[in-house]
Image (cartoon, rainbow, N blue to C red):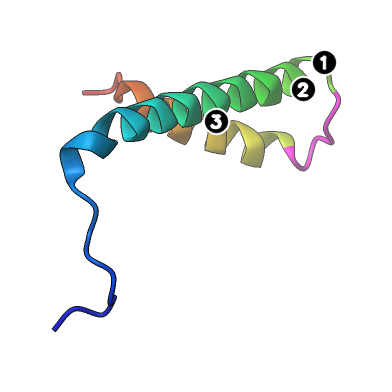
Amino acid sequence: MAKVKEPPKPLFPLKHDFYASLDNFAHQAGMMADMCRQLIQMDAVSEKIKPMLQERIDAFQAARFGDDNG
């Protein structure tokens, strides 16, 4: 039994909106990672925060482009 009373929208007419939204999300996330990297380089964040921020940037880059370690 369906949880929603409205009929589902067909997938294929929505695929271009999905792709555009996903592309925008990936672009914005990449811009945020770049800004975080610049903040680290400019010493704009505390020494306590730098390793945590760098760890998250590295994890994001690995998820986005793949892990270079193998």
Secondary structure of the residue carrying tag 1 is loop
Residue 12 covered by magenta stretch: no
Q: Position of residue 42 (x, y in %)?
A: 82, 15
Q: What residue is shown with label 3?
A: 57
In the image, what residue occupies the spot 29% across and 24% down?
A: 66
Marks 3 & 2, CB-CB < 8 Å contact: no
Magenta residues, start to end: 44-49
Q: Which kind of residue does numbered mark 3 sit on?
A: Ile
Q: What residue is shown with label 2?
A: 39
Of the two numbered discs 3 and 1 on the same chain, state the one appearing first in sequence: 1
In the image, what residue occupies the spot 43% across and 32% down?
A: 21
Q: Is residue 27 left or right of residue 32?
A: left
Q: Position of residue 64 (x, y in %)?
A: 37, 26
Of the two numbered discs 3 and 2 on the same chain, state the one appearing first in sequence: 2
Identify the image quadrant of the N terminus. Answer: bottom left
Secondary structure of the residue carrying tag 3 is helix
Marks 2 & 1, CB-CB < 8 Å contact: yes
In the image, what residue occupies the spot 23% across and 35% down?
A: 13
Instruction: Work out whether 8 lies above or below 49.
Output: below
Mark 1, residues whose alpha carbon is within 10 Å: few (<14), some, or many (≥20)? few
Q: Which mark is residue 19?
A: none
Residue 47 covered by magenta stretch: yes
Q: Position of residue 57 (x, y in %)?
A: 55, 30
Question: Majority secondary structure of the magenta segment?
Answer: loop
CA distance for labels 3 and 2: 12 Å
Q: Is residue 45 left or right of residue 26?
A: right
Q: Which kind of residue does numbered mark 1 sit on?
A: Met
Q: Which kind of residue does numbered mark 2 sit on?
A: Leu
CA distance for labels 3 and 1: 16 Å
Mark 2, residues whose alpha carbon is within 10 Å: few (<14), some, or many (≥20)? some
Q: What residue is shown with label 1?
A: 42
Quadrant location of residue 20?
Answer: top left
